[in-house]
Image (tube, rainbow, N blue to C red):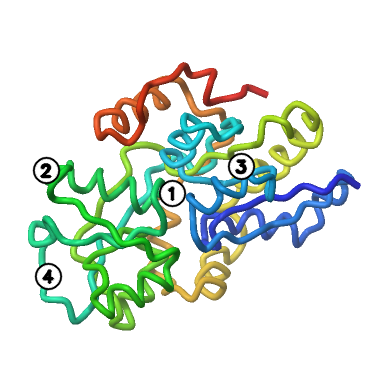
């Protein structure tokens, strides 16, 4: 049985992986798939791909594009979630900041450099016409727990994270969300180490086929909203809103989207160059 390590954030977007594992669908294809939760998000998964700790990552589009350009020996093989990610701009509940404009020049909590929370702080700054050199400052907090501690203790002033994941923290009065900042592209892709692609094409196709068959019908699974609400400790109406605005994909990300992401990252000085579509993707 072929052992395959897959990494992703422990969030509602990835419930389909849990369901297919629970059903034993990979074992039927002689694949021992092991799921690994990455609380540190994109930056932690990029490192895990580089180190060979995981073979496959369900990862933020902008983060993996940056890391492949920076030398990560992986390729994007598919879009996973087609719709943008809704990032909430959060402050501590007791914070004096009421608007995004007041955050100009203050310190953003980020999980690590090159992470989604880091890159989206630039997008948020650009959206609000800040000076990217002078008006951005960062504090590395590793993960969501670190952000709670950092904002509460005043080590950092604001934090961008997926708004439905952080909604329970808003509901309980730990965070206050003062704005939203949607990503300008499909949010999650599936990236695979190049050496794994070369030597395990059959297994990779089987894995993608299994997960895609589940995401195609994900919204039609009986009581899926209640399952998500219970598993991720979210309000049922929040889950229903999220399901309503989220679309999965079973296709390879297209060249136009890849170029749009690169152009934006290049403009923000996040990547040093724009590379060919084929350097970032692999068509199975």
State how far apart marks 4 and 1 are (Cα): 30 Å
Q: Nearer the viewer, mark 3 or mark 4?
A: 3
- Asked where in the image residue 208 lies, by quadrant, the reply is top right
Q: Which residue is labeled 2 in the image?
A: 131
Mark pair 4, 2: CA separation? 19 Å
Q: Position of residue 273 (x, y in %)?
A: 37, 23
Give how far apart the Cα atoms at labels 3 and 4 are: 39 Å
Quarter of the image for the C terminus: give it: top right
Mark-to-mark CA distance, 1 and 2 = 32 Å
Q: Quickly name the residue at label 4.
A: 97
Please tell me which of labels 4 and 1 falls first in the chain: 4
- Element marked by disc 1: loop
Q: In the structure shown, which secondary structural element does the residue marked by tag 4 occupy?
A: loop
Contact (CB < 8 A) between labels 1 and 2? no
Of 90 and 249, the residue lying toward us: 90
Q: Earlier in the sequence, mark 3 or mark 1?
A: 3
The residue closer to the viewer here, 8 or 236, is: 8
Q: Determine whether, in the image, residue 179 is placed left or right of residue 243.
A: left
SS type, badge 2: loop
Q: Nearer the viewer, mark 1 or mark 2?
A: 2
Where residue 281 appears, as percent x and y from the top left, is 56, 25
Report which residue position mark 1 lands on: 246
Q: CA distance from mark 3 to mark 2?
A: 33 Å
Instruction: Please tell me which residue is depicted at 38% across the width and 75% down the height of the picture.
Output: 168
Q: Nearer the viewer, residue 164 or 121?
A: 121
* Circle 3 residue: 50
At a point 74% along the width and 41% down the height, the residue shown is 207
| Residue 46 percent across, percent down from the top left | 54, 45
Residue that appears at 52% across and 71% down: 232
Q: Are marks 4 and 1 in contact (CB under 8 Å)?
A: no
Label pair 4/2, CB-CB below 8 angstroms: no
């Amino acid at each position: 049985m072929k052992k395959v390590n897959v990494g992703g954030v422990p969030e509602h977007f990835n419930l389909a992986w849990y369901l297919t594992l629970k059903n034993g669908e990979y074992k039927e294809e002689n694949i021992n798939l092991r799921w690994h939760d990455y609380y540190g998000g994109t930056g932690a998964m990029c490192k895990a791909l580089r180190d060979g700790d995981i073979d496959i990552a369900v990862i933020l589009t902008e983060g993996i594009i940056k890391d492949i350009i920076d030398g990560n020996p992986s390729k994007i093989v598919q879009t996973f979630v087609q719709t943008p990610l809704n990032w909430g701009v959060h402050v501590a509940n007791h914070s004096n900041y009421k608007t995004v404009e007041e955050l100009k020049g203050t310190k953003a909590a980020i999980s690590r450099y090159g992470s989604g929370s880091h890159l989206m702080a630039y997008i948020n700054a650009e959206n609000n016409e800040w000076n990217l050199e002078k008006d951005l400052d960062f504090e590395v907090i590793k993960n969501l727990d670190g952000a709670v501690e950092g904002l509460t203790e005043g080590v950092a002033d604001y934090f961008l994270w997926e708004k439905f994941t952080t909604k329970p923290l808003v509901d309980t009065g730990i965070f206050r969300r003062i704005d939203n900042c949607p990503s300008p592209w499909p949010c999650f892709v599936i990236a695979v180490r190049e050496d794994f692609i070369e030597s395990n094409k059959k297994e990779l196709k089987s894995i993608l086929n299994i997960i895609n068959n589940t995401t195609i019908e994900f919204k039609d699974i009986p009581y899926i909203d209640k399952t998500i609400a219970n598993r991720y400790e979210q309000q049922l109406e929040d889950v229903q809103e999220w399901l309503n605005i989220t679309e999965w994909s079973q296709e390879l990300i297209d060249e136009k989207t890849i170029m749009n992401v690169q152009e934006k990252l290049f403009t923000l000085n996040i990547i040093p160059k724009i590379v060919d579509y084929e350097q970032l993707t692999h068509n199975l």
